[in-house]
Amino acid sequence: MGWLAGIAASILVLVPCFWQSRIQAGDLSSHLYNAWLAQLIERGQAPGLSLAKQSNNILFDLVLSRLLRAFGPAPAQRIAVPLAVLVFFWGAFAYVWSCSRQRPRKAPWHVAPCLVMLAYGWVFHMGLFNFYISLGLCFGALALACRRNRWAIAAAFPLLGIAYVAHALPVGWAAGTLIYYWIARSLAPRHRILLLAGALATLAGLAVILCSRYRGEWAAGQASALSGAEQTWVFGVHYIPITVALLGIWTLWFQRMLDRRGAARTVLDIRFQLCLLSAASVVIIPGSVLLPGMHHTLNVMAERMSLATAVMFCGVAASLRPRRGEIVALAVIAAVFFGCIYADERALNRVETEMAGLVAQIPPGQRVISTLAEPNSRVNSLAHLIDRVCIGKCLSYANYEPSTAQFRVRADRENSIVVWQYAQSWGMQAGGYVVQTHDLPLYNIDLCDPAGRTLCITSLRDGATLKNTWLRVAPVLGTWDHRHN
C-alpha cells in the first residue's frame, strides 16, 4: 500500500469528524468538560476537587487537556477525536492485513468498509475514547507481535505500554491473545483443539474469580454482542436493518470459508480460534464489575469487547477474494449507516444549540443540570450534552466523572462545583433526586411544556423531586416524542 493511498484513506475515514458543527459522541462532552475542570483545579479555582495520580484510563484526557490549554475546546476535540479514529482504524487495519496471508502489497481493502463502520459504531458514539484508543493500539501491537521478526515483536511492547495508559482492559485481552497465539503456533494443528478447550475453561475460571472477589454481574442482553455486528446499532431501531445486513454479509463470508477450507481446517486455524475466544469472552465474562477503590462499576464490558470480536472476524475474512456483489452490498450498507449517523448527529446538535442559547440567559458560573434522556437510543445521546455547553459558562453539577473514582478528576468532599457521590449524580440524570438547600441555586434544562418541543431553563426549588424527561430525537423516523418518567 503506497503512502498516497494511505493518506487518501485517512481523509475519507475522518470525514464524519468534520461534517457537523460539533462531534456527537456521548462521553466526549464529559471528557472535554473535565479537561476544563482540570485546568480550574491546577489554578486552585476548584475547591473540593483534585487530580488523582493514576496510571491508566487517562491518555485521552491528558491529550484533551494539553490541546484545550493550547487551542481552546472546539479545536481540542477536532484534533483529539480524529487522532483517536486514526489510531483505531489503522491499528485494526494493520491487524486484519497481518491475518490476510496475501502478498505484502495486496491490502485487504474489501473489509475497509466494515472497519470504518466499526470505527464510528457504538463504542465511538458512547464516547469511550480511552478504551477505543487502547484497543486500536493493541491491534497494532498484535499485528507486530504476530510477525516472525524479533524487532517487530520487540516494538509491540511499547505500544502495549501506551495502550495501558489509555485503558487496561484491552491490554489484558491483548496479552491473553498473544500468549494463546504463541502457544498455538508451537503446537501441531490437531492439538490446538485441546488448547482451545483449556482457554475456554480459563475464561470460565476468570469469571468465577471476578464474581467471588468483586461484585460482578451479567447483563440480560449480553449474548446479543456475540458477533460484534451490533456495533453498527448506534441510536434507534432504524439501525437494526443495517446490523442484520452486515451480519448477513459476514455469514456469507464464513460459509465461503467453510466451503473452501472445510470445517476441520477452519476450526483449527489460529485466527478463527482467536476470534472464537474473543466472542466467548463477551458472554462468559461478567458485563460489569465493581473493582476496588471505584465508586461505580466498570460496565458494558461485553459491548466494549464485541468491537474487538468484530475486528478479529474481519481478520479471519481478510484472506477471502471479494466478489463484486459483496463489495457493492457493503458500500450500500455503509452509505445507509453513515446517512443515519449524519441525520441523528444533526438532530442532536440542534438540541445542543438550543441548550447553549438557554445557558446564555442565566448569570455565568451557575450550577446547571438537564433531565433530558433518549429512551430508545443505545448510547447516552442526550445525557452529557450539558457538559460541553457549560465549558467556561456554567457548572455541570451532575457530571458523573469526579464521583466515580475512575477518572483523574476527583470530588474529595461536598463542594459547589459538582456532586461528590455517584448516587446523587445518577439521581439527577435518571430522576428521583430531591433537591437540597446546599444545591441551590440550581438550574434545570427541560421541556417547557410536556406536550411541546421547546426547551426551557428554570430555577429549581428546595425539596423538588427531579423527573427524567424522555425525549426521542429520531429524524430518520420523522418523530420527536416526549414523556416524563
Image (spheres, rainbow, N blue to C red):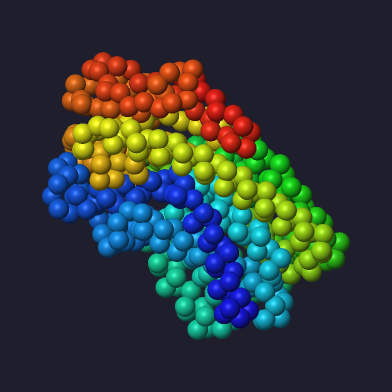
Q: In this view of the protein, which residue sits in the foreground, 41 or 451?
A: 451
Q: In this view of the protein, which residue sits in the foreground, 349 or 150?
A: 349
* Residue name at image x 51 percent, y 78 percent: 153
Is residue 198 something one can see in this rendering? Answer: no
* Residue name at image x 52 percent, y 44 percent: 345
The vertical placement of 465 against 8, above or below, is: above
Given the current orientation, which residue lies at the most extreme right position? 259
* Residue name at image x 49 percent, y 65 percent: 87
Q: In this view of the protein, which residue sits in the foreground, 234 or 132?
A: 234
- Residue 75 position within the rendered picture, expressed as x and y whole percent measured from the top left: 36, 58
- Residue 334 position within the rendered picture, expressed as x and y whole percent measured from the top left: 67, 54
- Residue 410 position within the rendered picture, expressed as x and y whole percent measured from the top left: 25, 45
Q: Is residue 382 left or right of residue 415?
A: right
Q: Is residue 228 left or right of residue 410?
A: right
The quarter of the picture where residue 235 lies is top right
Q: In this view of the protein, which residue sits in the foreground, 422 or 184?
A: 422
How many numbered marks appear?
0
Q: Quarter holding the N terminus?
A: bottom right
Q: Is residue 76 left or right of residue 286?
A: left
* Residue name at image x 67 percent, y 48 percent: 336
The vertical placement of 251 against 323, above or below, is: above
Is residue 96 something one can see in this rendering? Answer: yes
Given the current orientation, which residue lies at the most extreme top position? 463
The quarter of the picture where residue 399 lies is top left
- Residue 456 position within the rendered picture, expressed as x and y whole percent measured from the top left: 36, 26
The vertical placement of 475 against 169, above or below, is: above
